[in-house]
Amino acid sequence: MEYSEKEYEKMIGDLFCRFPSFQKVGSDAYKPGIEHMMFFDQLSGHPHRKYRTIHVAGTNGKGSVANMLASVCAASGMKVGLYTSPHILDFRERMRVLDGRDGSRERLYFISKKEVWDYITEWNETFEHLDLSFFEITTMMAFSWFASQEVDIAVIETGLGGRLDSTNIITPVLSVITNIGLDHCDMLGSTLGEIAFEKAGIIKPAVPAVIGESNPETDQVFERKVLYTNLPEPSFMGDRQRIMSLLTFADKTVPPLWDKKDRILRMMDLQGEYQEKNLRTVLAAMDVLAKGGIIPGAEDGRCNDGTATDMESKAELAIEHTAERMQFHGRWEKLADTPYVICDIGHNSHGLKYNFRQLDEMMESGRFDKLSIVYGAMADKDIDKIMSLLPAHAEMFFVTAPGKRAMSAEEILEKFISAGGNPSKAVCCADVRSALEAAGALPVKNYKSKDKDSTTTDGQSDAARHLVYVGGSTYVVAEAVPFFRQD
């Protein structure tokens, strides 16, 4: 069969249907253990050994952190691969390369449809024979493609957990764990300590690790993991202090550029209150990479007057423009100005508490006088807790997210009412489009008047003072985004 756009789309559809993916069937797709992946890796020739890697795990923020780190590495003059999941609109979003070798002419590109086609065609029988999952297939596809592109380094985001994740066949130069929250408890454990144990599985012997957020319940898990992983290493000779120097808690350090955090956060195109924690994690990781000689650091030529080095300036700009440089979407992303529409793929209480708090702050600023939330969720989320976090003054538009794992809009409404929500301020919608229309998020179909748009006393239109938030699930965001994109 010859390649064509039509056949490519059919092949991607078949890939989703034939092989279990977590996004479609949830825990049924989860295969604890990496034995199949290790065998597949051997058949593939261990492609990930041809370049350095950075491994990123965590309950929330790992996508933002991975993208920022990739952007910084490219700014340092490297050709960088980036593997993340899930995708929002295009399967190929999962695999990107930002080539920074020619600093003045950086180039971002995704794996091509033809390359995806060729890879699946070549390995199709092996997929069936090894009974691989969708994520195992896409992970090895990414590893192999990065090798073919001769990248210098690749930033690899875990899919779920860490210890038994398909990506955990790599030996990175740095392991990063953003934070630990209660999510995917049916697979990773019901306590923070148990979940931390699974995430800590990406920590390897003699490899430095950065933990984004410290917590008494999880710190000891990471400390034990680093200690016991390295005790057998002859180079450490049982020296506990030297072993523990491999471990950095970002929120217990003052990394380079942290004195500029307010300006960087203000300028960053990745917005959202939670980005401050992600920024600190990235800066701490940069410091470790610099000390390891992976990227240039402040000690490689800071000016005598204390001004930033050229690399620091490049890193600062790379962080500030991560979304643009990496074409990274769905994280506190503005979709429209009038009304002001924001989307975010945050989906658990640990992450959504920051989003909802920021919505409250935006309303309190006086800029907006109406808040609408379009919300859908998967059935395995802590909906009771999430409903208790919702802004009290918001109008709610509940939707059944696409996919078999979704909780119905009617069930979410019941949870909302049980949590003390006002039923007169909530409605169930048939799909994402109807929810957007009911919420007034689509400007073409809303705020119509026989006369001119109605205005408030300060001269702003009603639409301009209307804040709309779309989220709760990657699926909801993925369904919503095309309605706002012109291209």
Image (cartoon, rainbow, N blue to C red):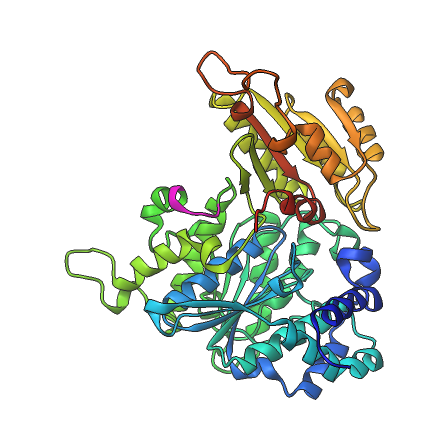
Task: Estimate the x, y position of residue 82 in percent, counting from the top left.
Answer: 54, 67
186 lies above or below 461: below
Q: Is residue 485 magenta?
A: no
Main secondary structure of the magenta stretch: loop
Viewer-proximal residue among 4 and 147: 4
Residue 486 at least partly seen: yes
Task: Estimate the x, y position of residue 172 in percent, counting from the top left.
Answer: 53, 73
- Whether residue 104 sits left or right of residue 64 in the image: it is left
Task: Estimate the x, y position of residue 459 in percent, counting from the top left.
Answer: 45, 16
Residue drawn 78% across the image and 81% down it: 1
Residue 345 at least partly seen: no
209 lies above or below 481: below
Q: Which stretch is magenta?
A: 266-270
Residue extending farthest to the front is 450
Residue drawn 49% across the image and 60% down it: 326
267 lies above or below 295: above
